[in-house]
Amino acid sequence: MAVILAIDDSLTDLTMIQYILSSHQVLVASDGKEGLRMLTEHPETDLILLDLRMPVMDGFAFLDKMGPLGVDIPIIILTNSEEVDKEILGLDKGAMDFIRKPLNFQALQKHIEVQLRLKQATEQIRQHNRMLEEQVQQRTAEIRKTNEITINALVRLLEVRNIESSNHSRRTKVMMEMLCRELQQHPAKGYQLSNKEIQELVDTAPLHDIGKVGIPDNILLKPGKLDQNELVIMREHVLKGVEALDYSMETSDTKITFIETARELIASHHEWFDGSGYPKGLAYEQIPLSGRLMAVIDVYDALTSKRVYKDTMSHEEALKVMRSEAERHFDPIIFQAFLRIADSVHAELKKD
């Protein structure tokens, strides 16, 4: 049994509708204003029969009021045979169907049956879509958790060799998210990032130096300055990091965006904006956005963290050093975005 709201100023027509639809619960209203009130009191309404010619508030005004309410209830308008133009206008305003007066018993029932079936089918599709969305969200959360566990395991390889502190992962993730969000607030062409892209950058940022696990200890843990030969070997950590995340793929397979983001970030975070970086000497927009973001984050983290070859540097000293080489090293848009949030970054990282 469906709940049907009949809105008509003709008592005769309302009585006939109640008789014809005796197998359903029929609510009645004599004009559009009363119909809106009834609809508010009965949100479970499944279908509306609406006359167009009524006093106080006609059918067109009712349709206009229904729109902003966002109520998704099929409406069948009741018209006379000479009101073709009004039928079209009613359909344009959101009605789903029309039936002409005088009302025909079988025609009215058939029109209502069709609309109720459509409504039921639509609701089933929506429920199915909601279930699919919930499954996708659950699966996405599982994948992200798996990625996080994998990343933490890889970063631990650096930590156990005393290359990085246990908070290195958190620091890079915090800075990457804050910097990306700042860029979202000041969008420039080529710098727009979706929430999904930001999440992937945040999750993969701790992997930028994972290739260092392949560098010998006598170079990696050397407390002094590296000589030229040692420097060449140290720089190999970039390609080693990219190779560490290599995966076999058939030509028809879709690339794994999470891994591709990580590989791109690792490969380009030591490139300098003026082209004097490594390993490829890329310059300006040739450097992927992920690498330009990571370059700023990596330098700040390196300056303000204790390493085997240096002590920590204060926040103010680190910014002074970064400003001195900014023109050569950093994308100016990204660096200015970082400077806007630098104090907030410092305050957040002090929580470590």
Image (cartoon, rainbow, N blue to C red):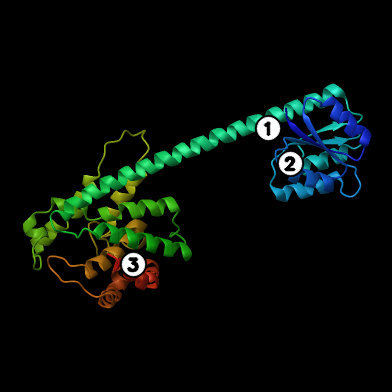
Q: Please give the residue where the numbered disc 1 appears in the rendered image.
A: 119
Query: On the rendered structure, is 277 left or right of 194?
Result: left
* Cα–Cα span, label 2 and label 1: 17 Å
* Cα–Cα span, label 3 and label 2: 51 Å
Q: Please give the residue where the numbered disc 3 appears in the rendered image.
A: 348
* 47, above or below 348, in the image: above
Q: Residue at x 89, y 50 (%)?
A: 56
Q: Are marks 3 and 1 in contact (CB under 8 Å)?
A: no
Identify the element where label 1 is drawn. helix
Q: Which mark is residue 42?
A: 2
Name the mark nearer the viewer: 3 or 2.
Answer: 2
* Rendered location of residue 152, percent (x, y): 25, 50
* 221, above or below 78, in the image: below
Earlier in the chain: of badge 2 and badge 1, it is: 2
* Rendered location of residue 328, percent (x, y): 29, 70
Q: Residues within 10 Å of mark 2 (few under 14, many from 20)?
A: some
